[in-house]
Image: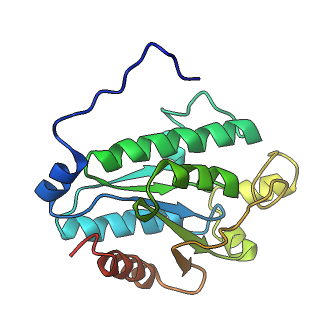
Amino acid sequence: MKTPNTIYHNATVTRQRREKLNKHKSVVIWFTGLSGSGKSTLAHSVEEELHKLGCRTFVLDGDNVRHGLSSNLTFSDDDRKENIRRIGEAAKLMMEAGVIAMTAFISPFREDRDNVRRLLSQEDFIEIFCNASLEVCESRDVKGLYKRACAGEIKNYTGIDSPYEAPINPELVIDTDCETLEESAIKVIEFLKSKNIVK
């Protein structure tokens, strides 16, 4: 809920000036997919490649954010929505700071991802669907969470007893169940180059 006692302050150092200093555009890259689909691994691999190109980057990772910014939230539908809202706002601030902000969250609900997209201008939000079958994701489950969810020990687990709504028109689809990490990362970097975000 917004308070009427706050006034937005316009800084003299603008996003455009920060981008010029950084020598690249700033965007929000939103990696989404099932748990185990390779979102975090791919996001950090892309960040490594961008760093080598001299880009200013940051990855907001699902587990890491829940240790701090969203430590008071559960995995109920409402709290998941609030988690994604917070991440969207944080990513937007990073983008305004001239950073290529990447997020790696299941973000299972299409409406929540679309709400983040609406926070930004169309060209500033890049949705990347990490596409992997449930069977492959289960086989990668080092924490054993899918197994526990199937046994009823964990409730509201995405892909088991809570839905995952795949993107309808993402900017990029990465088939992480049949590509190497290097192949997937190259696809993302080439896409960013094609959009003149990085050189």
Identify the residue at image location x=55%, y=78%: 173
Quadrant of the snapshot with the C terminus: bottom left
- Residue 191 in picture, x, y percent from top left: 38, 79
Residue 19: quarter of image: bottom left
Quadrant of the snapshot with the N terminus: top right
| Snapshot colouring | rainbow
Identify the residue at image location x=43%, y=41%: 90
Horizontal side of 68 relative to 36 (left or right) equals left
Horizontal side of 70 relative to 97 (left or right) equals right
- Residue 16 in picture, x, y percent from top left: 21, 53
Seen from the viewer's position, the closer of residues 121 and 66 is 121
Q: In the orientation shown, which residue stands out farthest toward the top?
A: 5
**Rendered position, 91 above or below 74:** below
- Residue 81 in picture, x, y percent from top left: 66, 42
Seen from the viewer's position, the closer of residues 156 and 98 is 98
Does residue 119 appear in the picture of this structure?
yes
Q: In the orientation shown, which residue stands out farthest toward the left?
A: 21
Does residue 76 appear in the picture of this structure?
no
Seen from the viewer's position, the closer of residues 141 and 52 is 52
**Rendered position, 95 above or below 67:** below
Identify the residue at image location x=41%, y=82%: 187
Identify the residue at image location x=73%, y=37%: 78
Tally of numbered discs:
0
Residue 33: quarter of image: bottom right
Horizontal side of 79 relative to 198 (left or right) equals right
- Residue 179 in picture, x, y percent from top left: 52, 86
Horizontal side of 45 relative to 55 (left or right) equals right
**Rendered position, 86 above or below 130:** above
